[in-house]
Amino acid sequence: QKEVEQDPGPLSVPEGAIVSLNCTYSNSAFQYFMWYRQYSRKGPELLMYTYSSGNKEDGRFTAQVDKSSKYISLFIRDSQPSDSATYLCAMSSYSGGYQKVTFGTGTKLQVIP
Amino acid sequence: DAGVIQSPRHEVTEMGQEVTLRCKPISGHNSLFWYRQTMMRGLELLIYFNNNVPIDDSGMPEDRFSAKMPNASFSTLKIQPSEPRDSAVYFCASSWGVGSGTYNEQFFGPGTRLTVL
């Protein structure tokens, strides 16, 4: 079993829809929870990160962490064609003297105009 | 700042050949990571350097893989001999500080797409 599980999609939604992306994990030592966005043929870029359970909002994006259920989500409101990308969840724990990051395999999102 | 720079962007080689991937981290960053991305396994950490010293190489698949960081502005990942199963996108990322208390954002380069025939 992988430490981080993420549905690969693809997920196709109409412009303006609310998108929900999710990951589950098994390692209770994870401390930080991140979402990266990766456009085709590019490197991942950090969207947002949270520490511990709760919600964090940044514009149209909301990250949610439920440590009791080992479940994290990313919500995108009013989705735009420019949001079409692969979204990677990531989590880190203090291991071997540093915050070691484990990534999900990514969910490919397509927003249709 | 130009961001993390990787070269080459694409590499096609034949099985058995030596492959060298290069990375220039963001100036001032003291941590450097090499990752490999495939459809099946996603993004996997290969090796982590802090202040030019390899700290965690537990992700290096086997002895055919080696990485060096001779100075703060340059790192290489070498595969010798290469095999078709090494075909993947290899990313370099850098960050400032990787302490225990806080998360430090990793900035990724554009990647090197490696195809081994």
Image (cartoon, coloured by chain):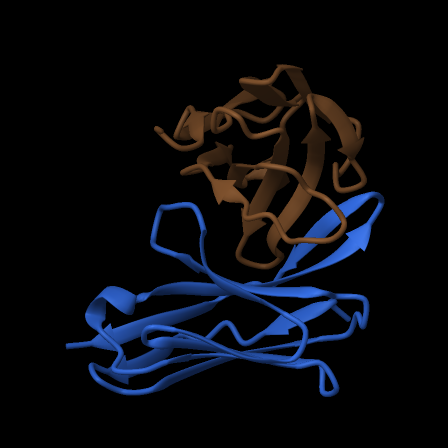
Chain colours: A blue, B brown
Near-viewer residue (A11 or A37): A37
Question: Most extreme residue toward the front, as rendered?
Answer: B101
Q: Position of residue B42 (x, y in %)?
A: 58, 56
Q: Is B97 positioned to the left or the right of B117 in the image?
A: right
Q: Position of residue A104 (x, y in %)?
A: 60, 64
Q: Is A36 positioned to the left or the right of A19 in the image?
A: right
Q: Quadrant of residue A68?
A: bottom right
Question: Most extreme residue toward the right, as rendered?
Answer: A96
Q: Quadrant of residue A67?
A: bottom right
Q: Image point 70% across, 30% down: which residue? A: B49
Q: Can residue B83 be seen at all in this image of the molecule? A: no
Q: How many numbered discs?
A: 0
Above or below, comparing residue A81 to residue A79 in the picture: above
Q: Image point 69% across, 39% down: which residue? A: B46
Above or below, comparing residue B106 to residue B76 in the picture: below
Q: Position of residue A88 (x, y in %)?
A: 51, 63
Q: Image point 33% across, 87% down: which residue? A: A18
Q: Is B86 positioned to the left or the right of A38 in the image?
A: right
Q: Is A37 positioned to the left or the right of A25 in the image?
A: left
Question: Most extreme residue toward the left, as rendered?
Answer: A113
Near-viewer residue (B54 or B44): B54
